[in-house]
Amino acid sequence: MKRKWKLWMIAFVVFVMTDIMMQSNRAEAKKRTFTVSSKTIPCSSSYRQKPYYNKKTKQYYMINSYMRRLSTTGGTLKLKKGTYKIPGTIYVPSNVKIVCANGVKIKKTKATGTKKVKSTKFLFQMISEEKASGKQNTGKYAASKNASIQGNGKVIFDMGNVNGATAVFVGHASGITVSGVRFRNKKGGSYIWIEGSKNISVRQCVFERKKDVSGLKNRMAVRLETSNQTTSDFSGKWYKKDNTVNKKVKIENNQFLGADVGIGTTKSVVLEKNKQTKEYYQTSITIAANTFTNTKKAPIYAVLWKKPTIKKNVVKRNGAEKRASAGMLGFGVEEPSFTANQISRKQY
């Protein structure tokens, strides 16, 4: 009897494990991979039939059509070498990877070729188009999850000197990675703007010098903010300004070339209720192994950060740049950890 019972239990366990593996394989099989070029047409004919589909918008609508296709299953969109002109915003849903091949250039443009469609100030937003069409319905890390933008080889995101434009907005998102991209030609705005998000990674990117624009928010290559009603200047209708803070942001192995501010926060969020003051700290920010060259104001500009880790960064200056720069500016920073950083061959 005991032997039969043991055999039955073994058979049951094998059956359960097999079923779990089959379900996992079926779920993985649902994820799709598409490879496109700058000449590929949208995967949905509805885009091609619209009067606003023209030579200036076709690449924008093509990429967004695949984002919509992948929004239900997740998967990967691979971009072949070429130039993609994007006047609007590409919405990246959960569980989607955008992989750019060597030689890809994504350029922010203003011209749409029609009065029915206006250009936007964002190249990418990490949220699905469906959610982005709603009104103040997304907060608390409920935008895209587990999505990424990856460059392989020489990949350029050219902001085209569009005034106030941002390359990648990460708001209320989680599990987002941006890697291997060279950002250039920003005029105001930020290359990457992270607000009210968690588990974010920015690595192996290059942020080039940009045109000077007044205002601290326009001077940061990577901007970290809290989603507050008063301090946040993000204008998306879908976005809840609910005091969600950034958590677990890693910015590693990047190069910052001639930035006013490499990485920073513009404003503190301190609220008073029932005579009690509450400060909203961004937590567990790691800035590691980055190189800051010829920074004008400060490589790091921290405001209300709790327990940030700043290690193995190099701040250097060549002979062409003589303006003074602080190693780090901090306001309301609690328990920071500094390890093995260097400024002009000196430890600090």
Image (cartoon, helix red, strand yellow):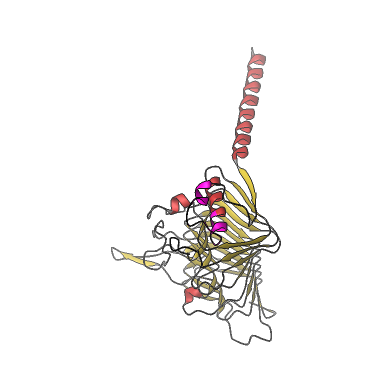
Residue situated in front as seen by the camera: 331 or 256: 256
Up/down of 169 relative to 332, above or below: above
Q: Is residue 142 visible?
A: no
What segment carries the magenta color?
45-61
Q: Which quarter of the figure is the C terminus placed in? A: bottom right
Residue found at x 52% / y 63% = 87
Q: Residue furthest left?
A: 274
Image height of 130 relative to 155, above or below: above
Please state the horizontal and vertical placement of residue 35, each as a whole percent of the image. 65, 50
Q: Position of residue 280 (x, y in %)?
A: 42, 64
Q: How many marks?
A: 0
Task: Kindly identify the residue that appears in the image at 53 percent across and 53 percent down.
Answer: 64
Asked whether 343 or 92 is in front, the reply is: 92
Query: Percent position (x, y) of residue 194?
Result: 51, 63
Classify residue 259 by image quadrant. Answer: bottom right
Residue 259, magenta (yes or no): no
Residue 244 falls in which quadrant of the image? bottom left
Position of 124 compared to 6: left or right? left
**Front residue (pair 217, 12):** 217
Furthest residue toward top: 1
Q: Is residue 51 magenta?
A: yes
- Is 164 placed above or below 317 here? above
Question: Which residue is drawn at the image coordinates 66% and 61% (left, top)?
Answer: 82
Instruction: Judge whether 221 appears above or below 149 on screen.
Output: below
Left/right of residue 318 with respect to residue 88 in the rendered view: right
Residue at (41% x, 56% y) in the render = 238
Q: Report whether residue 9 is seen.
A: yes
- Quadrant (top left/top right/bottom left/bottom right) for the N terminus: top right
Find residue 333 and report its horizontal and vertical position in percent: 49, 70
